[in-house]
Image (cartoon, grey):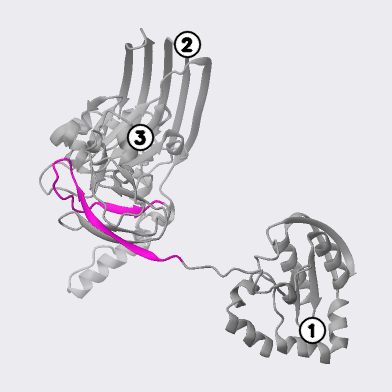
């Protein structure tokens, strides 16, 4: 204990702990009193097999098997070094000797722990002449002002130390700042939105003035350019992107239904259960009570009208073999999911800088597949299945006799004569069975694409047929799409998109 107090009084305790682990006096005293228990620990049998593993992981395995605790300093013992060892039912002392000797590490086994230290390091060699106390660096304060090109104070500018990014401050309303920095050669990084970031070497100065220069690319930080891609990367929080491969993970008749649950902040609601019926897409929620809510759709750079079209009255519905009600078809549903490359949804108001008031409810940019230079690629995809309304999702109705008893009971309570005298023989008809059907669905799509560096093409054809679960409803689509891209020169390109669709419902 006296030896320990001497080390603390001379100020070398922290340096010693970085070189050698000092055994606990209580443990050392316990070791001398229990040599038999120490021998029991040293002779505990362990099995170990490690190939190119970290020393720390190997010591953890030994600690669990031998039920001992390893005491060491990571500054002394190279715990991250990789070792290889194999031992089967061997004493702990023998395994530690084979493991630690090549690493120049010595160990001491006590009753409860194993103390690790470097070889040839002892307290006698750690004299005051061999150790130089570290002098803590002194902090100093720098002040002054951040200004723009006109010499006006720049409020809100950020100042951080390049070598220690956790130390920094921001300028006040007049552009002035005060910052404590460690002594030595330090470099300040000054930045502000709309200005070019600057690095300023402090040196021995205590007063630092910085004049910021405006950035000609400052608009890219706050405005989304609809026709570019570099701005989209700068404003990632306002854009959601869905890859075509993600949309094809489910068998959806159209991209409007395939978008459900794929993009954050985008709500997709099917307005009708009819196949190919209208779907409401809301970006950033409902923005108006009486105005339109649908976002603007851009397909390969061309805006399209997403207003549902079709029959909405009884007479036209009957003429088309449909049923009364909203039988409108969503124009977006005419784009097959297999033809889509990516979908980007612009959700912030900055998209109006390109598309104007039409982008008030957001913008959905759809990019279809195009030909790529290289070998001709051919793909064919399809699926078939059926849809139906399961029995547990139908209304539980009364059968014929139950309905007759309910009517008779109602009339008795009102003291009226009954209607059904032979309620047992009243026929039963479940009208749900009469209108519901097992509806088949079939889809087939083919695509051929390829080309050279100067000419690229893509041709696709698709067929989709879905019968509704209600008799008399259906959705049929036949689509053809052709695209060409020409590189006329290094600066001039031309392209052509042709899409033909026939829809029936």
Residue lying furthest front in this view?
Answer: 129
Front in this rendered view, residue 85 or 227: 85
Tell us which disc is closer to us: 3 or 1: 1
Residue 315 visible to an observer of this rendering: no
Give how far apart the Cα atoms at labels 3 and 1 are.
Answer: 67 Å
Residue at image location 37% in from the left, 22% down from the top: 478
Label 2 environment density (alpha carbons within 10 Å; few <14, some 14–19, many ≥20): some
Give how far apart the Cα atoms at labels 2 and 1 are.
Answer: 77 Å
Q: Which mark is residue 433?
A: none
> Of label 3 and label 2, which has the lower sequence position?
3
> Of label 2 and label 1, which has the lower sequence position?
1
Label 1 environment density (alpha carbons within 10 Å; few <14, some 14–19, many ≥20): many
Q: Which mark is residue 343?
A: 3
| Label 2: which secondary element | loop
Q: Which residues are magenta?
A: 137-162
Whether label 2 touches label 1, CB < 8 Å: no
In the rendered view, would you say 33 is above or below 69?
below
Give left or right: position of 32 versus 424: right
Q: Which mark is residue 111?
A: 1
> Of label 3 and label 1, which has the lower sequence position?
1
Please tell me whether residue 352 belongs to the stretch shown in magenta. Answer: no
Q: Which residue is mark 2?
A: 452
In the rendered view, would you say 342 is above or below 456?
below
Residue at image location 38% in from the left, 34% down from the top: 253
Give left or right: position of 419 versus 16: left
Q: Position of residue 392 (x, y in %)?
A: 42, 57
Q: Position of residue 237 (x, y in %)?
A: 31, 46
Residue 46 visible to an observer of this rendering: yes
| Label 1: which secondary element | loop
Give left or right: position of 79 versus 180: right
Find residue 291 and report its image quarter: top left
Tell us which disc is closer to us: 2 or 1: 1
């Amino acid at each position: 204990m006296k030896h320990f107090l001497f080390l603390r009084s001379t100020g070398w305790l922290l340096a010693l702990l970085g070189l050698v682990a000092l055994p606990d006096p209580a443990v050392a005293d316990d070791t001398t009193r229990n040599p038999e228990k120490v021998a029991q620990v040293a002779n505990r049998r362990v099995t170990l097999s490690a190939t190119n593993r970290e020393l720390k992981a190997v010591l953890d395995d030994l600690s669990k098997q031998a039920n001992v605790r390893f005491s060491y300093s990571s500054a002394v013992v190279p715990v991250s070094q990789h070792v290889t060892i194999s031992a089967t039912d061997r004493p702990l002392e023998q395994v530690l000797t084979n493991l630690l000797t090549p690493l120049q590490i010595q160990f001491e086994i006590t009753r409860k722990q194993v103390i690790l230290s470097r070889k040839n390091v002892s307290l006698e060699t750690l004299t005051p002449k061999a150790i130089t106390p570290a002098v803590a660096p002194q902090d100093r304060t720098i002040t002054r002002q951040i200004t723009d090109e006109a010499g006006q104070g720049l409020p809100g500018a950020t100042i951080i130390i390049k070598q220690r990014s956790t130390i920094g401050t921001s300028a006040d309303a007049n552009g002035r700042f005060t910052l404590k920095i460690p002594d030595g050669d330090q470099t300040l990084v000054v930045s502000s939105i709309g200005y070019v970031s600057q690095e300023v070497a402090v040196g021995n100065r205590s007063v630092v003035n910085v004049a910021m220069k405006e950035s000609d690319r400052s608009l890219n930080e706050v405005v989304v350019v609809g026709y570019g891609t570099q701005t989209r990367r700068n404003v990632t929080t306002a854009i959601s992107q869905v890859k075509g491969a993600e949309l094809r993970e489910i068998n959806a008749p159209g991209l409007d239904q395939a978008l459900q649950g794929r993009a954050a902040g985008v709500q997709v609601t099917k307005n009708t259960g009819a196949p190919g019926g209208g779907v409401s897409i809301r970006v950033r929620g409902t923005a108006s009570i009486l105005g339109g809510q649908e976002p603007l759709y851009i397909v390969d750079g061309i805006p399209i009208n997403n207003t549902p079209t079709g029959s909405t009255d009884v007479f036209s519905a009957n003429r088309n073999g449909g049923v009364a009600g909203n039988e409108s078809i969503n124009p977006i549903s005419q784009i097959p999911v297999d033809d889509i490359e990516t979908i980007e949804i612009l959700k912030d108001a900055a998209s109006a800088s390109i598309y104007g008031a039409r982008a008030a409810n957001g913008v959905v940019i759809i990019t279809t597949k195009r030909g790529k230079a290289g070998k001709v690629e051919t793909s064919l995809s399809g699926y078939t299945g059926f849809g139906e309304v399961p029995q547990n999702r139908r209304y539980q109705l009364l059968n014929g006799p139950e309905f007759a008893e309910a009517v008779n009971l109602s009339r008795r309570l009102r003291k009226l004569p009954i209607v059904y005298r032979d309620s047992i023989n009243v026929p039963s008809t479940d009208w749900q069975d009469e209108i519901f059907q097992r509806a088949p669905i079939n889809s087939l799509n083919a695509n051929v694409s390829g080309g050279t560096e100067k000419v690229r093409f893509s041709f696709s054809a698709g067929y989709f047929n879905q019968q509704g679960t209600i008799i008399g409803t259906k959705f049929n689509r036949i689509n053809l799409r052709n695209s060409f891209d020409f590189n006329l020169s290094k600066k001039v390109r031309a392209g052509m998109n042709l899409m033909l669709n026939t829809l029936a419902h």
